[in-house]
Amino acid sequence: MSKRDDDEAARTERARRIGLFRYMLIREAADPSLTGRQRGALVRKLAQQEHIDADGRPVRITRWTLDRWILEWRQGGFDALVPSPRQSQPRTPPEVVELAMALKKENPDRTAAQVGRILRAQLGWAPDERTLQRMFYRTGLVALKTAKPADAFGRFEADRPNELWVGDALHGPRIDGRKTYLFAFLDDHSRAVVGHRWGFAEDTVRLAAALRPALAARGVPQYILWDTSYVPRRPADRPAGSAVPDHGHQRVSHPHE
């Protein structure tokens, strides 16, 4: 038997299951001995309940649909309740379609198989993978791409001690109405504070006072970087005896730049 024959047989079998589901649902309300009032009460009760359809999914059937099935059964018997095999293809409920599309939009890299697993975990049922793929192609969701994250720099760290010191000034508390400043230098590899100094002014004198003891105690590093926004850019203002190369005296936003 070919695959086409197998598919046709599966559709036929499913159509009969649908017809049986419809008949089992309406058989009591379709009893000819019932009055119109009794039948109406039964149909309204059925419409208010949740039922398990031919595919095992919980569904609700409207009153008008139940009335139509009862009429079809009276006119053509059980066969009238059986849809054609072509029409019996399972239809994905709108709420499942909406959830599947939302999951794909949330993460465009999700495959149909992954979306299906999430649907089964949340709803207890999911369309097959091929159905989801067709849905994503039809709605254009396959063209979605995950937004490229903005460039982010990882934490830079010097490879060894005394390769790079970084310095800056921090505004401190007021003492007797005067502003204070903390000048400090850190070794970028060990994060040790190699030198620091408190002062009442934000200038190169205090900067040098923080740097000189560090140079005397730990030696001259290969590079020193500090924010020069608070000091004049005159060569004479470089800390005396620092032996720091000129290119260390500049504004630096990132060590890699």
Image (cartoon, helix red, strand yellow):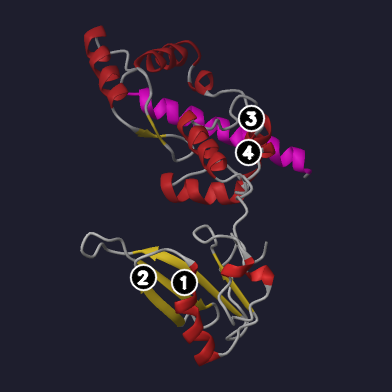
Of the two numbered discs 1 and 2 on the same chain, state the one appearing first in sequence.
Answer: 2
Q: Which residue is mark 3?
A: 139
Q: Secondary structure at mark 3?
A: helix
- Real-space Cα separation, disc 1 to disc 2, in angstroms: 9 Å
Residue 41 located left or right of residue 135? left
Quarter where residue 171 is shown: bottom left
**Label disc, if present, on residue 199 of the rendered structure:** 2
- Real-space Cα separation, disc 1 to disc 4, in angstroms: 74 Å
Crowding around mark 2 (Cα neighbors within 10 Å: few <14, some 14 to 19, many 20+) is: some
Outermost residue toward the right?
Answer: 2
Quarter where residue 40 is shown: top left
Q: Amino acid at mark 4?
A: Thr
Q: Residue at x 27, y 14 (%)?
A: 39
- Real-space Cα separation, disc 2 to disc 3, in angstroms: 66 Å
Q: Secondary structure at mark 2?
A: strand
Residue 62 located left or right of residue 159? left
Q: Is residue 253 above or below residue 21?
A: below
Q: Which residue is mark 1?
A: 205
